[in-house]
Amino acid sequence: MNNNTAIVIGATGLVGKQLVSQLIKSPNFSKVTVLVRRSTKISHEKLNEVIVDFDDMSSISQNIKGDVLFSCMGTTIKQAKTPENQFKVDYTYQYETAKIAANNNVSAYVLVSSAGATSDSSVFYSRIKGELEDAVAKLAFEKIRILRPSILLGNREEFRLGEKIGIWVMTGLKYIPFLRKWRGIKDAEVAKAMISMYLDSQSEKVVTKELDELFDI
């Protein structure tokens, strides 16, 4: 698998930036197409950057072609302002992109979800993450890999006090044996796990890894 074409959505986010950096350095990938609303400001011979409007999916279907779609798009209620806008980013954009990819014969799909994701959750964020997992699992991909990390560690563009406090707490969990699996994980480690899960040889269509399992990939 040394001549793969990757498609990435969420390339300007915390994990997305690390993923693109690792993909263009990897000998397993010859082309990386990123679909973004604003430029990554990255220049590389492998990189094909396409500025898109995710509210007009029909205009970008021709760019969703390759071997694997990596989906690491996401937002917060603070950024989105309303639950409707958050649902659009965390579910609609990602599902519609995945559906087009499957219809375009992209064989593999790798999704960054979240710890606790389940469609029957009473927590809005966890529920929409779970609903997305359930929906994409029904699409005609040969391989689907889902990652459910705990809190993400990395350098964010904006300051989030509540998240900073959460990071301190979740990082400290590594010193408590029975809570250690909930410890935070670095953005680069999640990106590395995404690539490794795509390259794995497991025969199951859908494989989900979460929390401390990601550190071992």
Image (tube, grey):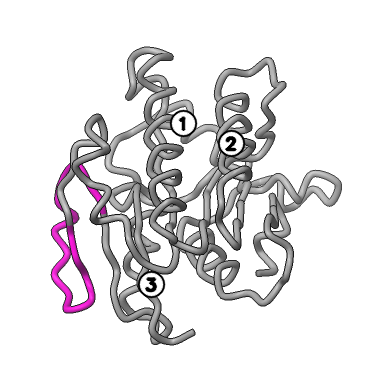
Q: Position of residue 104 (x, y in %)?
A: 38, 56
Where in the figure is residue 87, as x and y percent of width and height? Answer: 44, 23
Residue 135 - label:
2
Please say if 10 is above or below 18: above
Q: Quadrant of residue 80?
A: top left
Viewer-nearest of labels 3 and 1?
1
In reply to whether residue 82 is colored magenta, the answer given is no
Helix, strand or loop at label 1? It is helix
Of residue 155 and residue 19, the one placed in the foreground of this image is 19
- x then y, percent, for residue 168: 56, 41
Quick one: label 2, few (<14), some, or many (20+) residues within 10 Å?
some
**Residue tagged by mark 1?**
91
The amino acid sitting under disc 3 is Gln
- Under mark 2, the amino acid is Ala
Is the stretch drawn in magenta largely helix, strand or loop? loop
Earlier residue among tags 3 and 1? 3
CA–CA distance between discs 3 and 1? 25 Å
Task: Give the crowd class for mark 1: few <14, some 14-19, many >=20 residues within 10 Å.
Answer: many
Task: In this rendered view, identify the residue nearer to me: 184 or 118.
Answer: 118
Q: Which residues are magenta?
A: 35-49
**Alpha carbons under labels 3 and 2: distance apart:** 28 Å
Q: Residue at x 37, y 62 (%)?
A: 18
CA–CA distance between discs 1 and 2? 9 Å
Q: Report the amino acid beneath label 1.
A: Tyr
